[in-house]
Amino acid sequence: MSDTVESVIVAIDGPSGTGKSSTSKAVAAKLGLSYLDTGAQYRAITWWMLTNGVDTDDPAAVASAAGKPVIVSGTDPNHPTITVDGLDAAGPIRTQEVTSQVSAVSAVPEVRTLITGLQRSIAAAAAGGIVVEGRDIGTTVLPDADLKIFLTASPEARAARRSGEVKGSDVAATREALIKRDAADSSRKTSPLAKAGDAVEVDTTELTLQQVIECVVTLVEEKRAAG
Ligand SMILES: Nc1ncnc2c1ncn2[C@@H]1O[C@H](COP(=O)(O)OP(=O)(O)O)[C@@H](O)[C@H]1O
Ligand SMILES: Nc1ccn([C@@H]2O[C@H](COP(=O)(O)OP(=O)(O)O)[C@@H](O)[C@H]2O)c(=O)n1
């Protein structure tokens, strides 16, 4: 728990396309907090596996290679960065190939142990406070976060948002891919996608991004005033 107003730790979880990244970055920038995209870290380790010939459908192979890549996340919300073995990975981690394999890699317990440790050390080093977004931040990574938010939205809204990012993409196919990834992320044994018991749920289906940002900023400010 934070004992000064500045060192607030905010956990934002939820499925794909609910607005976690856009909201977290904007809230962190507005409140002068650091920002960590934990999905980018799972994407980065997946990209490394794919480019180093590791069979991402073989959990034992993934587990034994998990400690090899060096993943470094920059936490400035206005300029988030991610490198793998010193290489800029921001572009390559967003490919369709990585997106289709990331759930398999992130389900491997050895991967989660390593990445969770990295996330906790980044949060601990963020003296001014941090917004951390992902799937298991409130439940597993930072169970003592000062504020936990769980974002939701209908599959239709999420698919429309995601396909809006890629010119010419098929909304129905995007919707199916999202649902498949949610199911894999929610059903894995180790720290699945889940809402923490003490998280505030915000359904963003009918809200603009600006409204979601304002809602979360208000919740953080209320926490700070109370604490
Ligand atoms: N409330 C909203 N209304 C409309 N579009 C949104 C909303 N929230 C986010 N978006 C857009 O949806 C896309 C996915 O948002 P993102 O923040 O990447 O979601 P997530 O991190 O949960 O996968 C982005 O293009 C973003 O601008
Ligand atoms: N805390 C987290 C964050 C992401 N992930 C995994 O990483 C994947 C990619 O996360 P992401 O946040 O980049 O996904 P998008 O919703 O942005 O497409 C998820 O589908 C999960 O498999 C996870 O397991 N735990």
Image (spheres, rainbow, N blue to C red):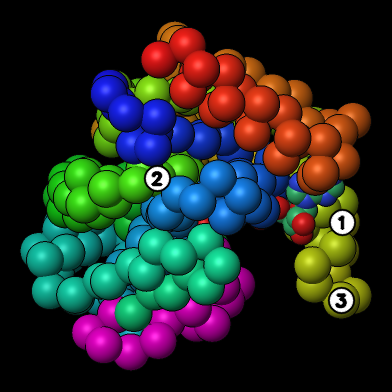
| Residue 216, position as x, y percentages in the image | 64, 31
Which image quadrant for residue 145?
top left
Residue 91 inside the magenta-drawn segment: yes
Q: Amino acid at mark 1?
A: Val
> Considering the numbered disc 3 on the image, is that residue within a helix, a strand or a loop?
loop
- Determine crowd level at label 3: few under 14, some 14-19, many 20+ residues with C-alpha closer than 10 A: few
Find residue 54 and name its label.
none
Left or right: where 212 falls relative to 167: left
Extreme residue in the bottom direction: 87
Mark 3 and mark 1 residues within 8 Å of each other at the beta carbon? no
The mark lying in front, picked from 1 and 2, is: 2
Left or right: where 133 falls relative to 153: left
Residue position marked by numbered label 1 in the rendering: 171
Residue position marked by numbered label 2 in the rendering: 130
Q: Earlier in the sequence, mark 1 or mark 2?
A: 2
- Residue 138 shows in the view: no
Residue toward you, 115 or 215: 215
Q: Quadrant of the C terminus?
A: top left
| Residue 108, position as x, y percentages in the image | 25, 48
Tell me the residue at 34%/37% (across/down).
Answer: 7
Q: Quadrant of the N terminus?
A: top left
Tell me the residue at 52%/61% (across/down).
Answer: 77
Find residue 167 and name its label.
3
Question: How far apart are the alpha carbons under marks 3 and 1?
Answer: 11 Å
| Residue 22, position as x, y percentages in the image | 66, 53
Q: Range of the magenta residues?
A: 84-99
